[in-house]
Amino acid sequence: MIGLIIGIILGWYLPVTYPTSYSLYMSVAILAALDSVFGGLRAHMEGKFNATIFVSGFFGNAILAGVLAYIGDRLGVPLYYAAIFAFGGRLFDNFAMLRRHFIEKIGQK
């Protein structure tokens, strides 16, 4: 959790820019990374968090999504939709589980 907060603060204040031609790849990679973050939060809430699995999933999913978008762009096939559907669906599933955990914890107090 502390690493996530540090990452958000660093990302907020560091002037990281990229060419607009990479915006499709970056957006898909960010979606995949957010899926990993929400999955890590969910695993933490369930007591199943493993840092190695989280870090490998974070970078692996982001790179895979970016590469899929790049290959699809080169082939003229919108392969980025596969990443959007897969990671977008999982993102909302993980968010729903986190919401349920928070509501249950608040209800127990």
Image (cartoon, rainbow, N blue to C red):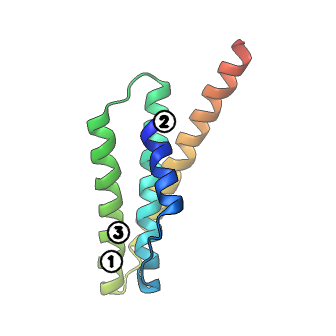
User: The residue tagged with tag 1: helix, strand or loop?
Assistant: helix
Amino acid, disc 3: Gly
Q: Quadrant of residue 55?
A: top left
Say if residue 86 shows up in the picture.
no
Name the residue at the top extreme. 109
Task: Give 15 or 45, whichever is nearer the viewer.
Answer: 15
Number of residues whose C-alpha sits closer than 10 Å to that of mark 2, classed few (under 14), some (14–19) or many (20 or more): many
Question: What residue is pinned by disc 2?
Answer: 41
Q: Quadrant of residue 22?
A: bottom left
Task: Give 88 or 32, whichever is nearer the viewer.
Answer: 32
User: The residue tagged with tag 2: helix, strand or loop?
Assistant: helix
Residue 4 screen position, x and y as percent: 46, 43
- Distance (Cα) linking label 2 and label 3: 23 Å
> Marks 2 and 3: which is nearer the front?
2
Task: Give 76 or 60, whichever is nearer the viewer.
Answer: 60
Number of residues whose C-alpha sits closer than 10 Å to that of mark 3, classed few (under 14), some (14–19) or many (20 or more): many
2 and 3 marks in contact (CB < 8 Å): no
Question: What residue is pinned by disc 3?
Answer: 66
Res 56 label: none
- Distance (Cα) linking label 1 and label 3: 6 Å
User: The residue tagged with tag 3: helix, strand or loop?
Assistant: helix
- Residue at 37 percent of width and 81 percent of height: 77
Amino acid, disc 2: Leu
